[in-house]
Image: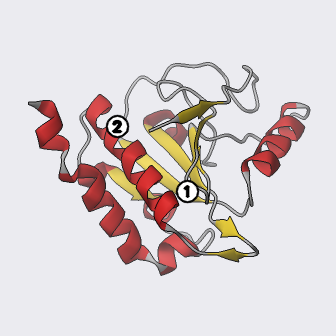
Amino acid sequence: MKIYDVNLNKNEMTRPGEKRKELKKIVVCDTKIKNIDEMLKKIKEIEKQDEEYFSYNYVVSSLGKIYLLVPDNEISYFSKKIKVNLESISIGVLLENKGEKKYNEKWKKSLISLLNMLCQKYNLKSNDIVIEYDMYNTRNFDFLIDNYMIFEDIKKESLKNLWLLKY
């Protein structure tokens, strides 16, 4: 699994540089952003203002590329709820491909690999992996909610061989 290290500059609005004290969840967030260039452009704009916070620890593109924006031991700003940011690793997913939202095997395989690595690293279980909707019961963007069984399969696959890797 290759992870492209974007590593955002420390900035009060996008990457405060604060270490996470406790990890409870990995939150997978559907975004309305189409690609990594658009994501980085938005983050650069947010760095220049002082009203909005925004970042993810990781981003998985529709092409299956994994990007590290904020180290996973640091806080990212993906939620409007501070407690959620303090206790979670965030993964933004970019599912837009040729004008429509749909998942593909490259995206799925990369997300499974990333979740597997994080679950091993932090000793997390299946119920510790959630989508944004599970955190505050509000609809954001629809793909992960409307295709919840795909997400459940991804969770199962990401933990499937974990016990083999520990021994």
Find residue 50 and report its horizontal and vertical position in percent.
86, 34
- For the N terminus, give its image quadrant: top left
Residue type (three-letter) at the residue carrying disc 2: Met
Q: Nearer the viewer, mark 1 or mark 2?
A: 2
> Which element is circle 2 on?
helix
Q: Of the numbered discs in the image, which one, if any, rests on residue 29?
A: 1
Q: Of the numbered discs in the image, which one, if any, rests on residue 123?
A: none
Find residue 158 and report its horizontal and vertical position in percent.
30, 52
Is residue 31 shown above or below 144?
A: above
98 horizontally vs 163: left or right:
right
Q: Of the numbered discs in the image, which one, if any, rests on residue 117?
A: 2
Asked which quadrant contains residue 49, the reply is top right
Find residue 166 and report its horizontal and vertical position in percent.
14, 32
Total tally of numbered discs in the picture: 2
Q: Residue at x 57, y 19 (%)?
A: 18
Asked which quadrant contains residue 122, the reply is top left
Is residue 15 shown above or below 143?
A: above
Q: Is 96 in front, or is 51?
A: 96
Is residue 12 shown above or below 79?
A: above
